């Protein structure tokens, strides 16, 4: 089993290909992001984090998980719950990036110990600006947990 | 001489004899006299004793006696007479005129008449009259007089008594008052009274009872069946049971039951009664009242029906309210979902049109056909027209984004849980001004494309007056102030010297006033509706801001209104509800 966190790896959990593309565009030419791994639903995210068929994953944990809430099959909140339940991923940095903030989503996420909750701006410039700020903060400024 | 002497002697002797006789007679007489004196003394003593007893008795009974000898004109009063008429017993009896002064003026004439008639005709009299006492009180006296005539039928003497009946009189008056009150009460209430002598089955009642039962009014003494025959057949058994039970249990009896009149009409009675028992606990009488409650019953039934109807209505109303609440929730939820789902495509359009612009800006194509030999002229793919089209797409998607965010806010402020607590509006105003300034500046930059221009050239003057602390939800109220101040900034942007005034009036009315372009007063109502816009393209906006304001104020049970004239500036007022305000 590969241990620890890779300091320049991001896991993006997002089912919308256009949003994936926009986020990737935002991080393009930002050299603090070495690798963005993308999974498009909650089940894939579980496999990615905890491995498949009893085998642990063969890659280190990401420094940051960007999580959309509206996902097919397993929702973002359920995924967050699993992450926080599992000893290996309990301290993982998870930032929710979602289309809009509903009170009960906010409450559920903060109850589950989300690290940050971001509403995706509609304006492209603001979107790029926000993505980069989030990336910069969590990937550069923030001291990651020692896993 | 001798003879003379003898004769003299004889005469002397005779005289002596006579003297002796006389002496003897005197002796006897004397003895008798002494006996007589002794007897008289005894009689007098007895008389005195009996007089003393009489005086005592008179004092105890408050009865005085008097005697008037018409021949001598002498009046004799017992001691108690003095007391009754408030004269000093140590003095002599008062004169007739003194006596008359003591008698109450209203009784004086009758008293005089009776006494004088008795003197002249010998008739007896009994008279109740009042005596005015020196301390101002009134005493009630029953006077009796009797005349005595001589053989010729001439009245020679009047005698009689006076009796203090003040207490008896008061008791009589009290009794009369009571009886009067009772009669009045029965008359006014039309309460029927009854008294049933159980053993003999005699039922006595007052006039009201047969009137209530529609029976002959002159029959005041009947049998119990005369009453029970009147009771409605359906009520007869249980009313009877009630009477029996009350008598057995020594309880009060009370029942509301129907009676049927001769003409078949049905009336409601309230009956109440109580048993009267002998020493061995056996019920001997039952007394009570009946009262016609037909009208009360009718009112009661009407009220019960009205209450039932009201309850029905209430249930329907709450069901309807629940439905409306459900519908409302569904609508809110729908608008939230739609807005949420619209956000992604809007974001994509805006994002990719920008990416496309960037991409096209780097693309240059060779001009076909017009190139001179040996030279390759390139022209930009993104010419002025294409750039304009991209602008339109971007601005439109921007606008759509604003609309969606407005809708989301409107939906959120309608649904969110309110946290009510005292809120200092002054703090909220400061925060709202700060946010609104930033927001307006960024919007200006956005609309000016690159944001390089300094658009906020004119300084806005803010005048902030006293603002109250109100009960409300701070987050929502901040939104209200933000929207109102944002509008004020927006619509006073073109004023010579933009000035925004925020303050309060009595009763916690808060206002936001600008000196901007204003609006026509007939538009004041409708502009609070969602998507209602009064101004054209020159002022950006979604038409949702005031709808949000109104929604929040309504959630605070308050009201919001606006006053303006075109080009005269506008003033927006709001006041939170009484239950939340103060």
Image (cartoon, coloured by chain):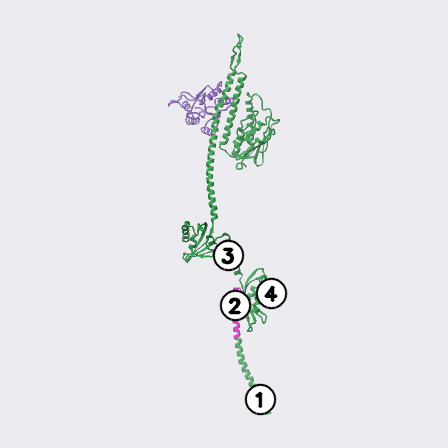
Query: Which circle marks residue B54 in the picture?
Result: 2
Q: Magenta stretch containing residue B42, yes or no?
A: yes
Residue under pointer 3: B179
Q: Which chain is green?
A: B
Q: Residue at x 52, y 71 (%)?
A: B47
| Colour in which chain A is drawn | purple
Residue B436 location, quadrant: top right
Residue under pointer 4: B98
Disc 1 is attached to a residue of which chain? B
Crowd rating for badge 4 (residues with CA inside 10 Å; few <14, some 14–19, many 20+): few
Separation of residues labelled 1 and 3 (CA atoms): 101 Å
Q: Quadrant of the N terminus of chain B?
A: bottom right
Q: In the image, A42: left or right of B571?
A: left
**SS for tag 3?**
helix
Q: Are marks 1 and 3 on the same chain?
A: yes
Separation of residues labelled 3 and 4 (CA atoms): 39 Å
Disc 2 is attached to a residue of which chain? B
Separation of residues labelled 2 and 3 (CA atoms): 38 Å
Q: Are marks 4 and 2 on the same chain?
A: yes
Upstream in the sequence, badge 1 or badge 2?
1
Q: Whole-percent x and y of residue B126?
A: 54, 65
Upstream in the sequence, badge 1 or badge 3?
1
Q: Magenta stretch containing residue A125, yes or no?
A: no
Residue under pointer 1: B9
């Amino acid at each position: 089993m590969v241990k620890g966190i890779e300091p320049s790896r991001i896991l993006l959990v997002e089912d919308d290909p256009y949003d994936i593309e926009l986020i990737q565009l935002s991080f393009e030419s930002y050299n603090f992001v070495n690798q963005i791994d993308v999974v498009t639903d909650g089940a894939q995210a579980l496999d990615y984090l905890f491995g498949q068929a009893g085998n642990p994953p063969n890659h280190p944990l990401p420094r940051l998980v960007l999580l959309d809430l509206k996902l097919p099959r397993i929702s973002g909140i359920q995924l967050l719950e699993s992450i926080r339940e599992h000893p290996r991923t309990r301290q993982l940095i998870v930032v929710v990036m979602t289309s809009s903030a509903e009170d009960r989503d906010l409450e559920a996420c903060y109850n589950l110990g989300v690290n940050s909750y971001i509403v995706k701006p509609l304006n492209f410039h603001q979107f790029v600006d926000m993505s980069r700020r989030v990336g910069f903060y969590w990937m550069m400024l923030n001291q990651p947990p020692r896993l | 001489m001798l003879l003379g002497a003898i004769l003299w002697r004889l005469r002397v002797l005779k005289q002596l004899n006579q003297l002796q006789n006389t002496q003897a007679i005197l002796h006897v007489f004397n003895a008798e006299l002494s006996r007589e004196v002794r007897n008289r003394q005894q009689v007098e003593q007895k008389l005195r004793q009996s007089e003393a007893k009489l005086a005592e008795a008179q004092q105890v009974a408050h009865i005085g006696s008097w005697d008037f000898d018409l021949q001598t004109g002498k009046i004799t009063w017992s001691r108690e007479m003095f007391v009754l008429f408030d004269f000093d017993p140590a003095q002599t009896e008062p004169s007739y005129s003194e006596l008359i002064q003591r008698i109450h003026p209203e009784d004086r004439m009758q008293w005089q008449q009776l006494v004088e008639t008795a003197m002249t005709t010998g008739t007896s009299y009994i008279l109740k009259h009042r005596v005015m006492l020196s301390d101002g009180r009134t005493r009630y006296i029953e006077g009796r007089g009797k005349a005595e005539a001589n053989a010729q039928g001439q009245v020679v003497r009047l005698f009689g008594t006076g009796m203090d009946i003040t207490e008896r009189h008061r008791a009589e008056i009290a009794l009369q008052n009571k009886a009067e009150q009772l009669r009045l009460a029965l008359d006014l209430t039309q309460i029927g009274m009854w008294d049933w002598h159980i053993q003999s089955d005699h039922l006595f009642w007052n006039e009201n009872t047969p009137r209530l039962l529609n029976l002959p009014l002159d029959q005041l003494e009947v049998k119990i069946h005369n009453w029970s025959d009147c009771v409605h057949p359906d009520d007869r058994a249980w009313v009877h049971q009630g009477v029996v039970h009350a008598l057995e249990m020594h309880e009060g009896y009370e029942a509301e039951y129907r009676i049927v009149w001769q003409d078949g009409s049905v009336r409601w009675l309230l009956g109440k009664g109580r048993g009267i028992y002998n020493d061995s606990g056996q019920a001997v009488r039952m007394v009570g009242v009946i009262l016609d409650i037909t009208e009360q019953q009718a009112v009661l039934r009407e009220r019960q029906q009205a209450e039932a109807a009201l309850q029905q209505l209430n249930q329907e109303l709450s069901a309807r309210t629940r439905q409306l609440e459900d519908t409302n929730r569904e609508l809110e939820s729908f608008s939230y979902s739609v807005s949420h789902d619209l956000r992604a495509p809007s974001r994509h359009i805006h994002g990719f049109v920008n990416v496309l612009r960037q991409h096209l800006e780097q693309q240059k194509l060779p001009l076909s056909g017009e190139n001179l030999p040996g030279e390759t002229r390139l022209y930009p793919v993104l010419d002025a027209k294409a750039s304009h089209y991209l602008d339109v797409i971007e601005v439109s998607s921007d606008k759509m984004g604003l609309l969606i965010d407005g809708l989301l806010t409107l939906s959120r402020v309608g649904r969110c849980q309110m946290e009510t607590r005292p809120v200092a509006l002054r703090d909220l105003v400061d925060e709202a001004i700060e946010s609104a300034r930033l927001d307006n500046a960024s919007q200006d930059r956005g609309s000016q494309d690159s944001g390089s221009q300094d658009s906020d050239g004119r300084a806005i003057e803010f005048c902030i007056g006293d603002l109250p602390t109100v009960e409300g939800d701070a987050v929502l109220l901040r939104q209200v102030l933000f929207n109102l101040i944002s509008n004020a900034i927006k619509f006073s942007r073109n004023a010579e010297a933009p000035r925004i005034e925020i303050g309060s009036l009595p009763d916690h009315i808060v206002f936001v006033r600008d000196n901007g372009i204003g609006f026509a007063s007939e538009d004041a109502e409708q502009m609070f509706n969602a998507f209602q816009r009064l101004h054209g393209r020159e002022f950006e906006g979604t038409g949702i801001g005031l709808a949000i304001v109104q929604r929040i104020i309504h959630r605070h049970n308050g009201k919001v209104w606006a006053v303006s004239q075109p080009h005269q500036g506008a003033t927006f007022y709001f006041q939170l509800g009484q239950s939340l305000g103060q």
